[in-house]
Image (cartoon, rainbow, N blue to C red):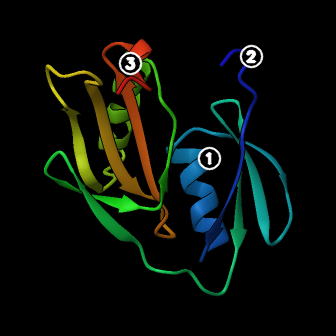
Amino acid sequence: MSNLKPFHLAVPVKDLDETRSFYRDTMGFEEGRSSDRWVDFNFYGHQFVIHMVDFKSELEANPVDGHAVPVPHFGVVLDMSDWEELAGRLKAANVKFVIEPYVRFKGEIGEQATMFFMDPSGNALEFKAFKDESQIFVK
């Protein structure tokens, strides 16, 4: 697929100010438009919006490479150097990981560095980087 377009993703949050601070200050995302109920962010070139809601459902999990992967989750595939920088920044900020940064499928097709963590509203995020980015969709 060429000429990849930015995606738009909106997620529910239980505390707008706390979650806004997490994405702006901890994650380092530039803030865009906002109101008293929602905030836009530049999420690696994608439009990401947090929306204040009164109810948020619980997460489920699926086993992947010996870990309980939270579902739903979202994130971005980064270059390895950007992934390492983000992992270091999150560790320095004492972010609690659901799955600590590690390399999964080591030595196999699709080998990738991955990490999972939650925002303050319980939304699960995964950021990954492939050893060989051409293997993202290889079976």
Quadrant housing the C terminus = top left
Q: Secondary structure at mark 1?
A: helix
Query: What residue did someone put label 1 on?
Result: 24
The amino acid sitting under disc 2 is Asn
Dot label at residue 46:
none
The reply to whether the C-beta atoms of the residues labelled 3 and 2 are less than 8 Å apart is no
Quarter containing the N terminus: top right
The amino acid type of the residue labelled 3 equals: Gln
- Quarter of the view holding residue 17: bottom right
Look at mark 2 in the image and give the residue it sits on: 3
Q: Return the residue found at the far bottom.
A: 54
Tell whether 83 sits left or right of 120.
left
Q: Secondary structure at mark 2?
A: loop
Kindly identify the residue that appears in the image at 74 percent across and 16 percent down: 3
Name the secondary structure under disc 3: helix
Q: CA distance from mark 1 to mark 3?
A: 31 Å
Q: Looking at the picture, does residue 54 appear above or below residue 124?
A: below
Image height of 137 relative to 48, above or below: above
Closer to the camera, 130 or 100? 130
Q: Residues within 10 Å of mark 3 (few under 14, many from 20)?
A: few
Comes first in the chain, label 2 or label 1: 2
Q: In the image, residue 10 lies at what x, y percent?
A: 70, 58
Q: Which mark is residue 135?
A: 3
User: What amino acid type is highlighted by mark number 1?
Assistant: Arg
Q: Is 17 above or below relative to 84?
A: below
Identify which residue is drawn at 35% across, 21% down. Answer: 130
Residue 31 drawn at (x, y percent) = 74, 45
Query: Foreground mark, 2 or 1?
Result: 2
How far apart marks 2 and 1 lie (CA) works out to: 28 Å
